[in-house]
Amino acid sequence: MALLDRRDRETGIIEGRFITHVLNEQGDEILKDSKKQMKGFTSSKWSRNKMTINGNTLTYDTVAATRFVDMKTRRSKGYTRGNKKIPPGKKKKKSFPIHNKPIFRHKKIIIRTLSFGFTDEVKNSFRQLAKNEGLI
């Protein structure tokens, strides 16, 4: 119960506000980077990405097809294309880095910011915001 009690006190409120702020900021950046990478995809199906922040959790919802567009290889069972036999196995294909690259780039930034970005100056600014809103 000590952790739950700590969240209600001043430090927990300030930390929670900081975490929510960082997740909000990076969530918007993830969506912006994904959209920039998908500039050649014109169908409305590809623009159904959304980001939700619930407490200290960032959830990224996207179309499952974007995961497959991002892959660099695919497995083939072997088939005939016209008069040319394609052997089975792993095949290289053109990949579009529209999912993994933006997600993992911003994941590193989120980890770094949450680990080292909560300085005294940041604490004071969030403390002032919490006081202005009447949370403390």
Image: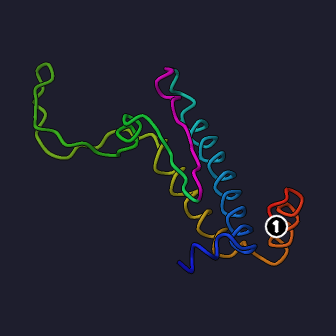
Q: Is residue 120 above or below residue 99?
A: below
Q: Residue furthest bottom?
A: 2
Which residue type does callout 1 highlight? Answer: Ile
Q: Is residue 8 left or right of residue 98?
A: right
Q: Position of residue 76 (x, y in %)?
A: 16, 39
Observer-nearest residue: 15 or 118? Answer: 15
Task: Write down the residue under mark 1.
Answer: 136
Instruction: Residue at 37%, 37% (x, y): give it.
Output: 64
Viewed as shown, does residue 125 lie left or right of 93?
right
Reply yes or no: does residue 53 show up in magenta.
yes
Q: Residue 9: image x %, image y %?
A: 71, 73
Determine the residue positioned at 72% across, 72% down: 117
Q: Residues within 10 Å of mark 1 (few under 14, many from 20)?
A: some
Query: Quarter holding the C terminus?
Result: bottom right
* Residue 98 drawn above or below residue 25: above
Residue segment shown in magenta: 43-55
